Amino acid sequence: MNRKKVIPFIIFFVVAALALSGCGFSANKETGSKETEKGNKGSAKQVLNVTASAEIPTMDSTKAHDAVAFTVLNNTNEGLYRQDQNNQPILAMAEKDDVSSDGLVHTFTIRDAKWSNGDPVTAHDFEFAWKRVLKEAGPYNYMFVTAGVKNAQAIIDGKKSADELGVKAMDDKTLQVTLENPNPLLETLLTFGTFLPQNQKFVEKLGDKYALEADNLLSNGPFKLAEWKHESSWKYVKNPTYWDAKTVKLDEINVYVVKDDATGLNLYESKKVDRVGLTAATVDNYRDDKEFKTNTLAGIGFLRFNLNNPILKNKNIRKAINFAIDKKGLTDIALNNGAVPLYGIVPKNYYFSPDKKDFRELNGDLLKGTKEEAKKYWQEGLKEAGAKSVKLSINISDAESSKQMAEFIQSQLETNLPGFKLEIKAVPFEQRLEIEKSIKYDISLSTWGPDYSDPMTYLDMWVTGSSSNREDYSNPKYDALVEKARLETDKAKRYEMLLQLEKMLLEDDVAIAPLYQSGEAILQHNNIKDLVEHPSGADFSYKWTYIE
């Protein structure tokens, strides 16, 4: 998410007949409404209109790096495995996975399936796409290292060519994947969007135009992209060539980019939406509503620091910023949606040790301090940096909730750290990501959702050179411990390493400022069925969704 999930989706459903083009739409998760028109058989027409907070940055799975893209790809394409309704990995494009006795070789049998243009899906499509990620240094190339695919690290390090990746199409129906070490997480990892196949003939024919428009895409999943008006909307339609099309009930999903949260609430109150996300300003008005609910999610919010900045490279300055922000105030006032303060990087109630102890409780609050401590570290940091005052900017997306959080953080830092001035720079979501990737910011308000169900998904992003390491953080000891944890087969020993990694990142190096564990506050009617929300990987699956 960023990596994969930079912004979690909030789904609310809009009446299909609504003329959204004049609404000035935009919002923070995929949100939508039922189509009220009845079909010929008297059942509700299976058309869903949804909103998203941002445009799709890319539809090329080798280049995708955020929640918006991965959620769309999850619904238009399918890999060897996909997540089911209970968030468990199930066989998808593969109908069988034979594992060698030493656990190093997986031989996948590809089922009879077709691309949306009628071409068969083959093992060659997987070999081509996976090697393409490495050849083009895709933002998620490290996922092949996490999965333990043979030679992935050597390829990233420039010691081997991408053609030497441990994946080979033995024939059209047989894909062989060779690992460096047995990996119990492999099935879960293979549900992730970076491991999707691509039709080589189609990709190479289009060249630089591939995946830039709806007409320049192929789908092998439940839906295909019929329209894509980049900054304003896109449309899914049911994919008739999908191997499991009989399971898919929705005929169409329209998605509109909506950034004005109040618009969604107005539509809900006028009976034109069935589910809507609530902002901090409106949550309290609906707490007693029978359709109101809040959830605490696995996503996190945090501040990235540009560690090349002459002020922010000072650890005492970074610690002062951490301690100066009232995180409970941030979640209660600026968010007010079920989010909770976070003083680590791994959230609570999602990841447990082999003896069933919660990761967050085991490691405790790693970056929690008082305002007095903040001022102390601030003065020490200013002295070390040779500065009397500091003026920095914070990079945020232009969604309403991001602006509310940034204003709260600005007030906290300018009030609690004498001589600190913070300028807010709000830009479109995709632009914020580009600014982060180029590390051309001072501080960036960022979010992260887990790519897979393991604490490592929050920890390996800060390995030196990782595409998700957008602070330019580098600690050889941290890198070595990540690699050691990847290879460790003793679950208890591995878990201790993960706990140590978090302490190294936060207590020792103060590389970032954790802020909150994500939440959502929503109003939802009861006629939307089987909308599957995933805690890791893609945010949602529409494969099983229907309107009652």
Image: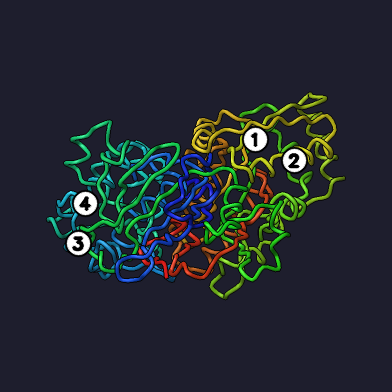
Amino acid at the residue labelled 4: Ser
The percent position of residue 26, horizontal first and vertical second, equals 53, 43
Q: Residues within 10 Å of mark 3 (few under 14, many from 20)?
A: many
Mark 2 falls on what kind of element? Answer: helix
Residue topped by disc 3: 110
Assign a secondary structure to mark 1. Answer: strand
The numbered dot on residue 443 is 1
Q: Quadrant of residue 163?
A: top left
Dot 1: few (<14), some (14–19), or many (≥20) neighbours within 10 Å? many
Q: Which residue is mark 2?
A: 321
Type of amino acid at the residue the image marks with label 1:
Ile
> Where in the figure is residue 450, as x and y percent of width and height?
50, 56
Q: Earlier in the sequence, mark 1 or mark 2?
A: 2
Q: Earlier in the sequence, mark 4 or mark 2?
A: 4
The answer to which of marks 3 and 4 sits earlier in the sequence is 3
Q: Residue furthest right?
A: 372
Which residue is identified by label 4?
Answer: 116
Q: Secondary structure at mark 4?
A: loop
